[in-house]
Image (spheres, rainbow, N blue to C red):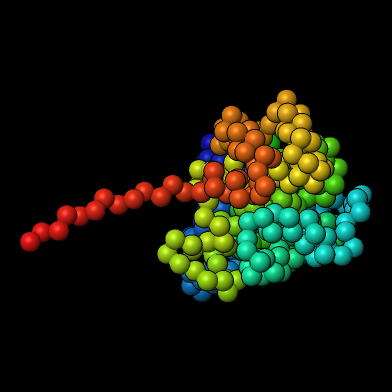
Amino acid sequence: MSEAADSARDKPPKVGTPQWIEDQVQQYLRSGDHDMMFAGWPGMHFLDAARQGTIRLQTALVEEVLRRTPGVECQVCIPKHLARWTRDKLAPMVHGLFGSDERPVVLDMFERSVVFLTPWNIAEVLRKETWLSTAWDLANLYLCSLKLPGLSEQARHIVGLSQEMTCYVAMSYFDEDDPFADFVVHEAAHVFHNCKRETLGLAQTRRREWLLEIDYVKRETFAYACESYSRISSTAGNPRQRLQALEQHALGPLPPDDRVDHGEYLDILGEAVRARNGWQRILKRCAPSRVRRPSVPMTT
């Protein structure tokens, strides 16, 4: 083979050609990365190219997931009445964080929010997900829950993921053996800072824009504290038992997240288990600090 032929073979495919598009698809499947502008994709205009490109990538993702999971069946028992199960699971947290007039609205929202990824709904979930990067994460979440290799070695090994007001949870949730872990509560806690009050028809002010005002850098601390406190308060009947449970939890394992300071996290839980309403103590410790503006002296 001539040097010219070798050079032609090694040359990247021309933008917009079928081979170039296939390379874009494979890059997305391998890494979750894609050009959000869909430059070079076929289409009558930008929006048409983005629409066609999105459908192409979504279809490829669904096909790849189904190819890797032939004949897979659900190995765990998903709650038959999922909405009721979700409401019962999250009711203690909602009751502790909201007033009586707002609790029904928040609980109604959560009834529609929790989605377990199963063989019966994974294709529909991936196709309907707005963000391609999130769809890729969900595909890996689902594959890992089946103890199958992810689409990439760099894929996050997670059991839950929240996107706006939806909490996606893997079937492996029901196999969790950590007595202080509850990924449904964890992901639901993230919804509080993702959902605006006006979205649910609740009163909103300049300082109360979101369901709960949580400091940006404390969001993971808040979610992990809610998760562990939910488990402690549901299994310990009195303050002494809650303290004993916290002492056991402090021995580890603790949240495997660099964004969470373990000392602060345990201190927050220490306040919570001693309080009458531990949920409010967690919220107070994770709320944004209010900086008082200096007064401007009046001039005459």
Describe residue 173's horizontal placement relative to residue 224 as left or right.
right
- Provide residue 150's location: percent of width, then percent of height: 74, 42
- Provide residue 182's location: percent of width, then percent of height: 75, 45
Please name the residue shown 36% across and 48% down the image.
291
Q: Residue furthest left?
A: 300
Whether residue 131 appears in this view of the structure is: no
Please name the residue shown 62% across and 38% down the image.
271
Please name the residue shown 54% across and 47% down the image.
284
Q: Is residue 159 above or below residue 119?
A: above
For the C terminus, the quadrant is bottom left
Q: Nearer the viewer, residue 120 or 229?
A: 229
- Provide residue 143's location: percent of width, then percent of height: 78, 47
Quadrant of the image occupied by residue 195 = bottom right
Whether residue 104 appears in this view of the structure is: yes
- Provide residue 74's location: percent of width, then percent of height: 90, 53
Q: Nearer the viewer, residue 145 or 38?
A: 145
Quadrant of the image occupied by residue 148 = top right
For the N terminus, the quadrant is top right
Q: Residue furthest top?
A: 251
Q: Is residue 224 above or below residue 47?
A: above
Label total for image: 0
Please name the residue shown 92% across and 49% down the image.
75
Quadrant of the image occupied by residue 115 = bottom right
Q: Is residue 53 above or below residue 265?
A: below
